[in-house]
Image: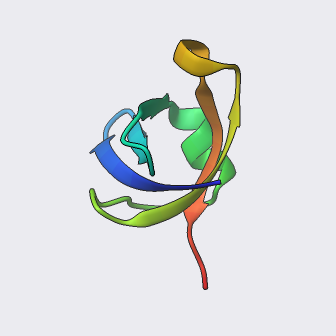
Amino acid sequence: MQATAYTYDQETRSGSVLLDDGTPVPFDAPAFDAGGLRLLRPGQRVRIEVTGEAGARRVTLITLQTF
């Protein structure tokens, strides 16, 4: 699934992404670490994997979107 980086806290390595419909979905340090990223800037397109439904969605992996 694709999304756009929305927020990112470098100290905690957590933040949130926006799905293409504008829904924010949070991610935590393990999801960030699983993608092997060093830094994330708001507005970057990312590829994510999620678990859960609707309001209980959580990102389990976040990495840069490659074309």
Question: Measuring 46% from the left and 29% from the top, which residue is drawn there?
Answer: 26
Q: Nearer the viewer, residue 40 or 59?
A: 59
Q: Relative to 7, is 37 above or below?
A: below
Split into 4 quadrants, where in the image is the N terminus? bottom right
Residue 9 visible in this rendered orientation of the protein: no
Q: Relative to 14, is 52 above or below?
A: above
Residue 6 x %, y %: 30, 46
Image color mode: rainbow
Split into 4 quadrants, where in the image is the C terminus? bottom right
Question: Which residue in the rendered view is the most extreme toward the front?
Answer: 21
Question: Measuring 52% from the left and 35% from the top, which residue is drawn there?
Answer: 29
Question: Which residue in the rendered view is the most extreme toward the bottom?
Answer: 67
Is 21 positioned to the left or the right of 37 in the image? left
Q: Relative to 32, is 41 above or below?
A: below
Residue 11 x %, y %: 31, 38
Residue 39 x %, y %: 39, 61
Labels in figure, total: 0
Residue 25 x %, y %: 47, 32
Q: Relative to 64, is 61 above or below?
A: above
Question: Measuring 58% from the left and 60% from the top, which residue is drawn there?
Answer: 63
Q: Nearer the viewer, residue 32 or 51?
A: 51
Question: Measuring 50% from the left and 33% from the top, which residue is drawn there?
Answer: 27
Residue 21 visible in this rendered orientation of the protein: yes
- Residue 65 falls in image quadrant: bottom right
